Image (cartoon, rainbow, N blue to C red):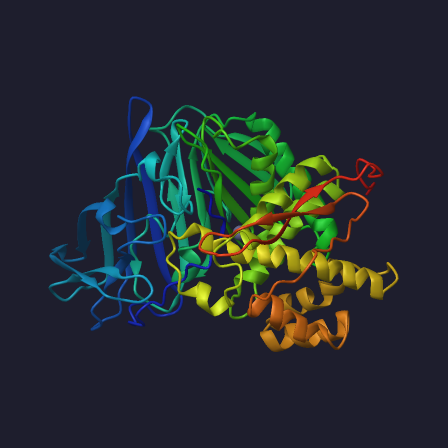
């Protein structure tokens, strides 16, 4: 089961003032290794507490794909300038993610130092978003959200993240989505929870501003996958344009077993979990789709507040059209992926659900969760065709969106109102009505359109979505005979 997610897994922190602005927060990680595999990650953190303010720190009890997060932290202990600090801990029901919170039972003075050990998440749980620390190829990778218990503070800290990889194989790296260790900078706790980290004997490809790292032995050659990431970076940067050539870091971890090929993306980087073998329904271009999709999130970003038809729909569209337009894969590969994602929208029991109804579905309900990917993809394909027609080929979906993306970079979020004003301008006065009917309310859109009719053509098929009593139209995609292999760029 594959679920691709943009990481917007932010949870509101209880605003307990535990550190004034300018405070330093140090975190150091080291490792225990048994038979070549990381068995424990040791964390030591320290920060200065404000006089008279009881400090607390916490970690989510669980996160999507990471059901036992708080229980994976052991041997929590704290000291301050006066010696050992006895602790209480309690589980707090905090939406959307409950927390485990540690509280000193006496007043704390000066610098508080907290030590604990994190047990890596088992590879058998690797099918979810790659937030937890999972071992691969003698190293380990994950997100800071899946390993760090942090002060409950809204302050900005001077962060210093350090690592000792001497217990890992010779030549091991310590690297992150914010660059090589040590990682330093001014960060809020939210920032500090959103960093990909990778430690171990990684294959790496340095091609600034792109860098790729791979742990373990994926079912396709790791060097080829990192090189694919570099080409995807170039295709995305040139197609979107508005970011220039931003720094970007791609992390792959290949765990033992069949490849889940799930990824999560944050600004500036992505971590993708692969296996050591393919599943029966996976081929190399499937991994290419996942990599391109996750990398696309860096440019697609999201609406404010996030709406998945946009973030996931546009990333899915880009991954299965731009990828082949730039010659990274054959059009037949993109047609096959378009067919699969069309099924996510049209052969789904949520085919005609309004978006609001999908929000109530369980995270584990993949068939519903992925419907916005397919619906959004089909919508953006049609919108791209409309924009090209209206501009007599002078504009594309991405070039028309560029000013909106640039505005977001300059601090003007893409709200629904901004989106709809742009849509009217780009696609005509009826475009907002179509958008509401098709995307928001889930009405059938008819024959899908694509901006690449020479290379991608829909062929009608009949499906009966799960739970439906009648058959309905869906589409497979084929590559017409007149398609040139690629478009030169
Ligand atoms: Zn995604």
Left or right relative to 272: residue 244: right
In the rendered image, residue 63, in percent from the top left (x then y), is placed at: 34, 54
Which residue occupies the foreground of this view, 397 or 299? 397
**Quadrant (top left, top right, bottom left, bottom right) of the N terminus:** top left
- Report whether residue 164 is seen: no
Which residue occupies the foreground of this view, 316 or 39? 316
Left or right relative to 450: residue 299: left
**Quadrant (top left, top right, bottom left, bottom right) of the C terminus:** top right
Q: Residue at x 73, y 75 (%)?
A: 430
Q: Is residue 290 positioned above or below 371 on the image?
A: above
Q: Quadrant of residue 189?
A: bottom left
Q: Residue at x 47, y 30 (%)?
A: 279
Which residue occupies the foreground of this view, 141 or 361? 361
Which residue occupies the foreground of this view, 47 or 271? 271
Q: Is residue 82 positioned above or below 433 on the image?
A: above
Q: Residue at x 23, y 48 (%)?
A: 115
In the rendered image, residue 382, in percent from the top left (x then y), is placed at: 71, 59
In the rendered image, residue 55, in percent from the top left (x then y), is placed at: 23, 65
Direction front: furthest residue: 470
Q: Is residue 56 positioned above or below 277 on the image?
A: below
Q: Residue at x 54, y 70 (%)?
A: 304
- Report whether residue 439 is seen: yes
In the rendered image, residue 256, in percent from the top left (x then y), is placed at: 39, 28
């Amino acid at each position: 089961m594959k679920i691709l997610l943009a990481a917007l897994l932010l949870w509101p922190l209880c605003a307990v003032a535990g550190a004034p602005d300018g405070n330093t927060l140090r975190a150091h990680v080291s490792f225990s290794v048994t038979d070549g595999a990381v068995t424990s990650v040791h964390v030591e953190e320290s920060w200065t507490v404000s006089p008279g303010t009881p400090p607390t720190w916490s970690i989510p009890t669980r996160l999507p794909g990471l059901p036992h997060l708080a229980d994976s932290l052991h041997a929590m202990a704290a000291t301050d300038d006066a010696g050992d600090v006895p602790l209480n801990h309690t589980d707090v029901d905090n939406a959307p993610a409950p927390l485990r919170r540690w509280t000193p039972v006496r007043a704390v003075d000066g610098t508080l130092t907290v030590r604990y050990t994190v047990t890596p998440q088992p590879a058998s749980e690797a099918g979810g978003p790659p937030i937890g620390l999972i071992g691969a190829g003698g190293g380990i990778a994950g997100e800071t959200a899946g390993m760090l218990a942090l002060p409950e503070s809204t302050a900005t800290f001077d962060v210093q993240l350090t690592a000792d990889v001497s217990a890992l194989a010779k030549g091991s790296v310590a690297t992150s989505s914010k660059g090589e260790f040590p990682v330093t900078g001014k960060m809020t706790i939210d920032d500090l929870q959103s960093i990909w980290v990778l430690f171990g004997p990684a294959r790496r490809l340095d091609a600034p501003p792109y860098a790729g790292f791979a742990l373990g032995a994926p079912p396709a050659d790791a060097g080829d996958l990192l090189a694919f990431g570099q080409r995807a970076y170039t295709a995305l940067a040139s197609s979107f344009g508005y970011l220039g050539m931003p720094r970007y870091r791609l992390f792959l971890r290949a765990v033992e077993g069949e490849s889940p090929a799930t990824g999560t993306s944050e600004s500036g980087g992505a971590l993708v979990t692969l296996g050591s073998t393919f599943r029966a329904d996976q081929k190399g271009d499937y991994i290419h789709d996942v990599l391109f999709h996750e990398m696309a999130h860096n440019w697609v970003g999201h609406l404010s507040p996030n709406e998945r038809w946009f973030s996931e729909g546009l990333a899915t569209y880009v991954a299965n059209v731009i990828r082949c337009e730039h010659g990274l894969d054959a059009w037949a590969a993109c047609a096959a992926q378009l067919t699969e994602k069309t099924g996510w929208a049209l052969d789904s029991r949520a085919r005609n659900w309004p978006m609001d109804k999908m929000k109530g579905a369980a995270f584990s309900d993949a068939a519903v969760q992925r419907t916005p990917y397919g619906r959004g993809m089909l919508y953006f394909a049609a919108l791209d065709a409309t924009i090209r027609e209206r501009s007599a080929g002078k504009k594309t979906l991405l070039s028309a969106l560029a000013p909106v993306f640039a505005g977001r970079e300059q601090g003007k979020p893409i709200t629904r109102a901004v989106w709809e004003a742009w849509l009217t301008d780009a696609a005509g006065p009826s475009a907002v009505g179509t958008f509401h009917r098709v995307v928001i309310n889930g009405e059938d859109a008819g024959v899908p359109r694509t901006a690449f009719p020479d290379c991608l053509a829909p062929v009608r098929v009949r499906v009966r979505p799960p739970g439906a009593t009648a058959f309905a139209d869906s589409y497979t995609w084929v590559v017409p005979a007149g398609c040139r292999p690629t478009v030169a760029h």
